[in-house]
Image (cartoon, rainbow, N blue to C red):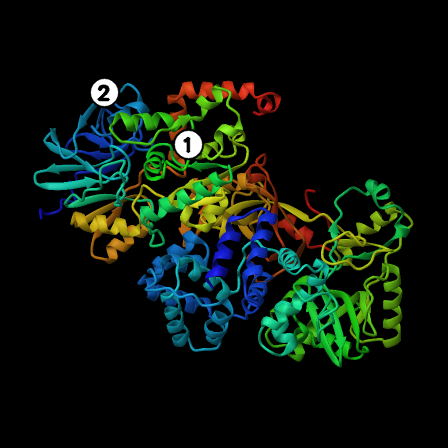
């Protein structure tokens, strides 16, 4: 645990990828396999399902530190991170012992799950009595499952490749599903054997395990003008063009009589989608499809909001399944008859996909339609109809591309050609301090539009969206200073301000919503730019937002 | 204990600053007034433009360096004067050289205004001395239980280790720190045998003022002096450079080639603050009292009533209230020298006070060729 905590502290101070890689490599080289197994698990984004509720952690920390709840909350507001807050308020340890990571996970972390709060509370207090500040911090991070130390999965992959001397691509492939293997294999842990299999020489342990998916091939954003397309991309005939669907990217795996559905985050989501489980069962063993999970109603795609609501449901009753039925819109085939198809060119995989779907007619799996166009101008015209079709734009896939790993271009390229976001000029009315790097800076804002047109003396600002991304550090500092200066009231961590700031907000989707005061919910809102030129009175109105609700409408002030 | 006089307080908050009606003077006022008592020379507490200044003898050199020609009367720590029937004395606050708590007494009632203070030992200034009083006015910069400073031996061991490791690789160690107080405390605390110590133009005159006041500091050289002699990058190898935070990211830094940077401040306790600062290392070092320090100091005064100024006023006021001490808040315009208003103003003052260095530095910049010269 001490070594892992020290690694965390080191990674936390480093910014250069190469330095982080060196730190990881020397850690793995010096760490026993059983501990390295867990280190890989946590660093690659593995999270044990909630072990201890945050509430119990807070209560145990308050008791151990002898602080009233309000004061602990004040501390948390200043720090912006629960694990860090707790590590700072606890009294010094009586004595510290060094327990190997694997043993700590097995003896301390995992047994906490499912215990009643009193038992968890007592176990946490015992644990803290033996840890220094850093170990407490890292330990709580592992318990809450949010390590966030700026290490990507790719970096872990490269470190393992460096330690073992095997190809990083092979490691990447073996690592797929590693963080979820408890579920796949039915047995609990990434153990020493699992770690050794990751770094075993090529040819050993390279066989697809159980329901393991392939690493997803990801697209690059296409951000240039239509005019540049012919020069950059050549003729559209060299590209397989599809709509870009707004759903959940997923792989459906059918092997040995079982079906697995994996989301892009490599979460196993089979149980969320019984329709796809049933559909997969009709396919032969040794089949892996790549596509998009969508709610499909009356032969067309439903807004993402509906899919989101369904994901949130704990129980999938008949009513939910009828109200929001899903399909897999398949666009690629990665394995057929147990053979990896990823090195086939895109057009050949497409032909195989069409053949398989035609032969087996799996209910609930459709093929993603191709979009035809003689030239880019014609495709661009079609592209403008994206919003009316409920899609986010187009995908351009090189016809001769193999299926790559992650966001790579070495075996061919996928481009995502997205439509411009909706945009609206809104007024900042509330601000809240951010978390992590942005703790104690006001970075999370609530935005409002006017409920009546300009000139109406009775009009008021109606909040409709929260956003916290899109500003530079410099802009954040300026806005933070203005928020502090113009604060009207404080409600806990939130400040209301005199409206003085106007921002152009961008968002991907918009839907009517009875749960919001404004009657409108927007998807992925972010700040496109600070309209320092625009007075508050000239910000947009609710009517402007409502106009965007019409299908096919474009941004109000683009 | 005399009875409190809520209708006749010895100190009240006015738009100009903390004011003593009985004596008709201010303590650390932020607007020009006729008579001011200055607790210490940080720019949010010591401003130009007052008619008459009263401050400690220990801090005279520094205060004059910062404020120039002022009508200054000084007192030794513990020495008392009487003004309009108010007995005034100054007592060590342990914050920086010459920092004081202001004790005022009228008809047996005693109020103490702390200014900024810390309770841990600091060899560059007199140690904080608790003063019994009826009403204590305390700062609260780090008034949250998360703030608990480690012992300064451990802190300097960390700094020395960082410097030594960089020096071993021939790298320069640039430590950003507040030029007045923090820089001298670091100078006094580090192991000067590791390598040469260089200072930015904003730090050097404060070192001189400290030395002139009798505080022993290791030998330092100005970066501008090396630059003026046309020494190359090799001259900096293995050195510790003390510079104000404003130098970070400036063209001034380019001369050091491969360097490691760090920032010394109490705020460096928090991971978010460290990451925002964007330096390789954050050393947790403050000249303000931590949470246990604040509570200890308040308890030592025996005060029945406490006014809380700048920092975590809401938190400390509530905590004291829940522990049987009548606590209120004074709204002041004091900042924290590491962040916020105090810093920029202070550095502006320092820059103005060190024209020679600035001139030397900019002359050197101009000599560096088109790339440097083109930089804004």
Where is residue B356? Give x, y as percent.
41, 18
Q: Is residue B254 visible?
A: yes
Label 1: chain?
Answer: B
Q: Where is residue A368 in the image (x, y as percent from the top left)?
A: 82, 63
Residue drawn at x 70%, y 60% as measured from the top left: A166
Name which residue lies at 82% across and 41% down: A228
B164 horizontally vs B329: left or right: right
Seen in the picture, residue B49 relative to A228 is either above or below; the reply is above
Residue B309 on image: x %, y %: 29, 43
- For residue B348, above or below residue A236: above
Q: Can residue A441 be seen in this view?
A: no
Q: Which of marks 2 and 1 is nearer the N terminus?
A: 2
Q: Looking at the rendered structure, which numbered label has been put on residue B71?
A: 2
Name the one closer to the observer, A205 or A74: A205
Mark 1 Cα shell of 10 Å, populated few (<14), some (14-19), many (≥20): some
Question: Is B353 displayed left or right of A174 in the figure?
Answer: left
Give the quadrant of residue A196: bottom right
Relative side of B177 to A221, left or right: left
Which quarter of the picture shows residue B33? Answer: top left
Please give the count of numbered marks on the rendered protein: 2
Q: Where is residue A382 in the image (x, y as percent from the top left)?
A: 83, 51
Label for residue B196? 1
Residue at the spot 23% in from the left edge and 20% down from the top edge: B71
Discs 2 and 1 lie in a common subunit: yes
Give the secondary structure at mark 1.
Answer: loop
């Amino acid at each position: 645990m001490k070594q892992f905590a020290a690694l965390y502290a080191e990674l936390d101070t480093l910014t250069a990828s190469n330095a982080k890689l060196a730190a990881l490599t020397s850690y793995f080289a010096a760490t026993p396999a059983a501990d390295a197994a867990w280190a890989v698990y946590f660093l690659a984004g593995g999270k044990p399902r909630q072990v201890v509720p945050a509430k119990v952690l807070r209560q145990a920390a308050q008791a151990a530190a002898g602080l009233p709840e309000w004061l602990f909350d004040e501390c948390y507001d200043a720090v912006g991170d629960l694990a860090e807050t707790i590590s700072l308020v606890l009294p010094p340890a009586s004595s510290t012992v060094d327990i190997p990571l694997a043993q700590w996970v097995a003896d301390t972390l995992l047994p906490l799950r499912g215990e009643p709060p009193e038992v968890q509370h007592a176990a946490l207090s015992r644990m803290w009595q033996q840890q220094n500040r850093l170990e407490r911090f890292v330990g709580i991070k592992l318990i809450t499952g949010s390590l966030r130390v700026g290490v990507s999965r790719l970096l872990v992959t490269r470190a393992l490749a460096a330690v073992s001397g095997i190809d990083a691509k092979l490691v990447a492939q073996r690592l797929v599903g590693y963080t979820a293997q408890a579920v796949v294999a039915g047995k609990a842990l990434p153990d020493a054997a699992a770690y050794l299999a990751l770094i075993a020489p090529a040819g050993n342990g390279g066989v697809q395990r159980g329901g393991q998916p392939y690493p997803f091939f990801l697209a690059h954003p296409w951000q240039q003008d239509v005019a540049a397309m012919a020069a950059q991309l050549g003729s559209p005939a060299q590209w397989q063009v599809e709509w870009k669907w707004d759903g959940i990217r997923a792989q459906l795996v059918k092997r040995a009589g079982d079906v697995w559905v994996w989301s892009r985050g490599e979460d196993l989501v089979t149980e969320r989608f019984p329709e796809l489980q049933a559909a997969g069962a009709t396919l032969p063993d040794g089949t892996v499809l790549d596509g998009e999970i969508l709610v499909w109603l009356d032969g067309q795609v439903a807004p993402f909001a509906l899919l989101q609501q369904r994901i949130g449901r704990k129980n999938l009753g008949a009513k939910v399944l009828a109200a929001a039925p899903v399909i897999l819109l398949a666009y690629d085939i990665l394995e057929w008859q147990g053979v990896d198809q990823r090195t086939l060119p895109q057009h050949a995989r497409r032909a195989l996909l069409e053949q398989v779907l035609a032969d087996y007619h799996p209910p609930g799996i459709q093929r993603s339609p191709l979009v035809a166009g003689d030239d880019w101008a014609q495709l661009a015209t079609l592209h403008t109809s994206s919003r009316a079709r409920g899609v986010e734009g187009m995908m351009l896939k090189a016809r001769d591309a193999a299926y790559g790993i992650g966001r790579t271009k070495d075996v061919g390229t996928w481009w995502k050609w997205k439509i411009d976001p909706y945009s609206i000029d809104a007024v900042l009315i509330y601000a809240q301090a951010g978390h992590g790097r942005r703790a104690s800076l006001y970075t999370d804002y609530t935005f409002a539009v006017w409920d009546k047109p300009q000139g109406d003396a009775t009009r008021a600002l109606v909040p409709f969206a929260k956003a916290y991304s899109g500003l530079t550090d410099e802009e954040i500092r300026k806005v933070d200073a203005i928020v502090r200066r113009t604060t009207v009231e404080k409600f806990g961590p939130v400040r209301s301000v005199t409206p003085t700031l106007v921002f152009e907000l961008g968002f991907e989707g918009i839907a009517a919503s009875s749960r919001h005061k404004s009657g409108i919910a927007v998807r992925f809102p972010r700040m496109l730019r600070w309209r320092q030129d625009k007075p508050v009175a000239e910000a947009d109105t609710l009517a402007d937002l409502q106009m965007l609700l019409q299908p096919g409408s474009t941004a109000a002030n683009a | 204990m005399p009875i409190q006089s809520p209708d006749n307080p010895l100190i009240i908050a006015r738009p100009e600053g903390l004011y003593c009606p009985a004596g008709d003077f201010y303590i650390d006022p932020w607007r020009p007034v006729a008579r001011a008592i200055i607790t210490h020379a940080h720019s949010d507490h010591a401003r130009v433009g007052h008619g008459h200044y009263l401050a400690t003898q220990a801090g005279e050199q520094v205060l004059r360096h910062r404020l120039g020609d002022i009508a200054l009367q000084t007192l030794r720590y513990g020495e008392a004067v009487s003004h309009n029937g108010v007995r005034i004395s100054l007592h060590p606050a342990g914050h920086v050289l010459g920092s004081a708590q202001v004790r005022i007494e009228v008809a047996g009632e005693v109020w103490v205004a702390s200014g900024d203070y810390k309770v841990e030992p600091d060899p560059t200034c007199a140690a904080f001395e608790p003063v019994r009083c009826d009403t204590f006015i305390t700062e609260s910069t780090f008034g949250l239980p998360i703030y608990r400073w480690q012992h300064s031996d451990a802190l300097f061991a960390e700094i020395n280790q960082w410097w030594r490791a960089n020096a071993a690789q021939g790298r320069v160690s640039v430590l950003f720190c507040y030029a007045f107080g923090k820089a001298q405390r670091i100078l006094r605390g580090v192991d000067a045998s590791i390598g040469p110590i260089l200072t930015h133009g904003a730090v050097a005159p404060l070192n001189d003022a400290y030395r002139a006041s009798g505080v022993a500091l290791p030998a330092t050289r100005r970066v501008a002096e090396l630059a003026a002699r046309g020494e190359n990058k090799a001259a900096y190898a293995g050195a510790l450079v003390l510079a104000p935070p404003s130098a970070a990211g400036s063209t001034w830094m380019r001369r050091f080639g491969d360097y490691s940077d760090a920032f010394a401040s109490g705020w460096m306790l928090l991971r978010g603050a460290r990451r925002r600062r964007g330096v390789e290392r954050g050393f947790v070092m403050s000249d303000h009292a931590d949470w246990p320090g604040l509570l200890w100091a308040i308890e030592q005064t025996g005060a029945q009533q406490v006014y809380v100024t700048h920092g975590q006023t809401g938190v400390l006021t509530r905590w004291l209230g829940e522990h049987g001490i009548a606590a209120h808040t004074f709204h002041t315009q004091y900042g924290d020298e590491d962040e916020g208003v105090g810093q920029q103003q202070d550095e502006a003052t320092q820059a103005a006070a060190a024209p020679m260095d600035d001139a030397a530095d900019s002359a050197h910049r101009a000599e560096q060729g088109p790339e440097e010269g083109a930089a804004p």
